[in-house]
Image (tube, helix red, strand yellow):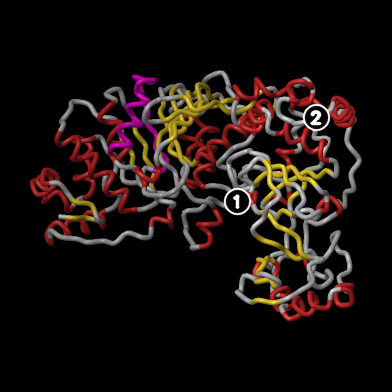
């Protein structure tokens, strides 16, 4: 027999068949079940009992489940639930009170019941009613198979987690050794809102963001993060442990905000799991563990869940939030302000028209069209995927550069470069369809991310898309500077020796360790301008001697080395800035 999609074991059917007469009174059957397994209010009303009794007589029921995305629902399998409980048990051999705020199918609760014989109270909350039923039946089945003299007091509640009275529960259990465990939804509030899910908290700015951030992307918080913060806020003063399966990005946010939240949590760990294996989803996720009612800590050990090997430790160190405390301790000497302004590359949002390939004496666009234009406004172009070598002056693609600074007039093209204008004008509809507001009320064929810096002969460039922090020295091709697209960041120089020294320092061990220490690889764009502007070239320069640099830079003169040092030790090199 199946009931709400859950297969009812034979021993449970026998229990209900034996007490069939008492099914006419839900209070009576609830008392029987309470004596067997400790669950309070197994049936919440008589109509639930009547419905079950009808199914019992039919001996068959098939109920489809909603799309699991509605609940951010990635149910924990039995093996993983048992592994998590076993891991926590090594740290907390005695637990009186178990709380799972989103208990799903009950696998964590059953695993805890099997492991902990000290439990006196269990509370599980679940919004999806069939899971509530399944959890109750699983608990009942376990105790039918493993009868005991004493049972925990168990409440499995059908309710939205954001409506449950956790404040009162926290106060009533403050003296119990507590384990808060679970797998809250791996979904954001905007994702749930987009599918009209009712599994949402009341509208609130729970991170207390500023006005602009609160109405933009930064206000799009993770539901699992919201539940985690609520649990930590209300139970961090309980003796015990906290163990949640959550996305790594949520763990990072919790540790980052610990600086201001100051929750009494310690021995904090992020135990990385294989989400593809465990849940068949491509998400970086972990078991987040912390000891409750501890002296507040602000760093987290990142560990492989399966073999226990330490990967790194991240969090707050010397008032900086870092990805690797060990690397930062070694390299923090260069944490400061870059003497050179890092820029992102050119942006046009019209690659089908603006990005070209050379074909003998003609050009070919991404539409496969071949045409002839003047080469004066055509420049070599490098993308993130092109920045693999230490040095380059080669390129695969080329692009049309219509302006030398943002907002500059483009009407000169028609007069000075008629073939280029004819081509661009024939594709005007592509430019008009660009959605970004940065092109609004700008001259036709406008581009962005362009300025005097774009035309520097030499560039030290890095990809903003990849996890590597390798820097490439880009030299001009046929005396013409090579451009970078907007997935790249760079600093520009007109002096080759200066560019060589900056390139040497950027790829040095201390700078690379520094970048590794402050870059979180799971960020949407791991490398960004804020990160790069923290490289203090003056401090990095002080870490090396001329002789050490000479081993990497051919024909480096002592005067070039010393002049570089003098320039970067000024507060900031004056560069043309349009921002």
Find numbered disc 1 in the image and state the secondary structure of the residue it sits on: helix
Q: Where residue 217 sits: x, y (%)?
A: 64, 53
Numbered disc total: 2
Q: Is residue 126 left or right of residue 494?
A: left
Secondary structure of the residue carrying tag 2 is loop
Relative vertical location of residue 211 with respect to residue 540 in this rendering, above or below: below
Quarter residue 566 falls in: top right
Q: Residue at x 49, y 28 (%)?
A: 311
Q: Which residues are magenta?
A: 79-102
* Of residues 457 and 1, the one drawn nearer to the viewer in this rendering: 457
Q: Is disc 2 surrounded by few (<14), some (14 to 19) or many (20+) residues within 10 Å?
A: some
Residue 122, placed above or below residue 372: above
The residue mark sitting in front, 2 or 1, is 2
Question: Which residue does the image show at 51% across and 53% down from the upper left?
Answer: 200
Which quadrant, please, contains the N terminus?
A: bottom left
**Residue 93 is covered by the magenta coloring:** yes
Q: Earlier in the sequence, mark 2 or mark 1?
A: 1
Q: CA distance from mark 2 to mark 1?
A: 30 Å
Q: Residues within 10 Å of mark 1 (few under 14, many from 20)?
A: few
Is 487 magenta? The answer is no
x and y percentages locating residue 272 in the rendered image: 44, 34
- Image coordinates for residue 289, horizontal then vertical, percent: 46, 29
Q: Nearer the viewer, residue 432 or 253?
A: 432
* Residue at x 71% of width, y 29% of height: 552
Q: Which residue carries the number 2 mark? A: 556
The reply to whether the C-beta atoms of the residues labelled 2 and 1 are less than 8 Å apart is: no
Q: Is residue 229 left or right of residue 370?
A: left
Which of 157 and 476 lies nearest the eye of the viewer?
A: 476
Residue under circle 1? 385
């Amino acid at each position: 027999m199946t009931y709400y999609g859950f297969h009812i074991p034979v021993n449970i059917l026998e229990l209900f068949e034996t007490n069939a007469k008492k099914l006419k009174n839900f209070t009576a059957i609830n008392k029987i079940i309470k004596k067997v397994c400790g669950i309070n209010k197994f049936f919440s009303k008589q109509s639930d009992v009547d419905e079950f009794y009808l199914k019992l007589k039919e001996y068959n029921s098939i109920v489809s489940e909603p799309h699991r995305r509605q609940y951010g629902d990635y149910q924990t399998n039995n093996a993983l639930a048992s592994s998590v409980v076993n891991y926590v048990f090594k740290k907390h051999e005695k637990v009186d009170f178990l709380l799972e705020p989103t208990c799903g199918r009950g696998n964590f609760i059953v695993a805890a019941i099997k492991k902990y014989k000290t439990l006196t109270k269990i509370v599980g909350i679940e919004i999806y009613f069939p899971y509530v039923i399944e959890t109750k039946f699983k608990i009942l089945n376990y105790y039918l198979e493993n009868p005991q003299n004493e049972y925990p007091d168990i409440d499995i509640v059908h309710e939205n987690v954001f409506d449950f009275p956790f404040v009162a529960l926290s106060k009533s259990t403050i003296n119990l050794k507590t384990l808060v465990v679970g797998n809250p939804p791996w979904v954001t509030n905007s994702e749930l809102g987009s599918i009209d899910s009712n599994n949402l908290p009341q509208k609130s700015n729970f991170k207390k963001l500023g006005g602009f951030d609160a109405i933009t992307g930064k206000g799009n918080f993770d539901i699992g993060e919201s539940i985690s913060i609520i649990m930590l806020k209300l139970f961090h003063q309980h003796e015990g442990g906290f163990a949640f399966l959550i996305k790594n990005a949520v763990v990072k946010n919790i540790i980052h905000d610990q600086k201001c939240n100051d929750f009494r949590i310690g021995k904090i760990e992020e135990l990385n799991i294989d989400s593809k294996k465990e849940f068949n989803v491509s998400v970086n996720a972990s078991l987040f563990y912390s000891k409750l009612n501890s002296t507040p800590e602000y760093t987290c050990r990142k560990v492989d869940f399966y073999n226990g090997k330490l990967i790194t430790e991240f969090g707050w160190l010397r008032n900086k939030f870092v990805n690797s405390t060990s690397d930062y301790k070694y390299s923090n000497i260069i944490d400061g302000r870059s003497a050179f302004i890092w820029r992102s590359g050119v942006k046009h949002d019209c690659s089908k028209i603006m990005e070209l390939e050379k074909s003998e004496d003609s050009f070919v666009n991404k539409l496969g069209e071949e045409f002839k234009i003047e080469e004066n406004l055509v420049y070599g172009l490098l993308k993130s995927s092109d920045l693999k070598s230490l040095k380059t002056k080669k390129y695969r693609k080329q692009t049309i550069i219509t302006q030398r600074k943002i907002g500059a007039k483009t009407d000169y093209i028609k007069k000075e470069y008629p073939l280029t204008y004819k081509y661009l004008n024939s594709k005007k509809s592509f430019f008009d369809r660009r959605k970004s507001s940065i092109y609004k009320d700008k001259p036709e064929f406008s581009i962005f991310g362009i300025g005097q810096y774009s035309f520097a002969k030499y560039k030290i460039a890095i990809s903003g898309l990849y996890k590597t922090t390798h820097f490439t020295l880009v030299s001009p091709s046929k005396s013409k500077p090579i451009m970078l697209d907007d997935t790249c960041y760079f600093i520009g120089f007109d002096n080759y020796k200066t560019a060589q020294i900056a390139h040497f320092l950027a790829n040095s061990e201390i700078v690379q360790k520094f970048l590794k220490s402050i870059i979180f690889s799971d960020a949407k764009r791991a490398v960004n301008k804020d990160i790069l502007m923290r490289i203090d070239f003056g401090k990095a320069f002080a870490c090396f001697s001329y002789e050490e640099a000479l081993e990497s830079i051919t024909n480096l003169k002592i005067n070039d080395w010393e002049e570089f040092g003098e320039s970067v030790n000024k507060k900031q090199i004056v560069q043309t800035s349009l921002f």
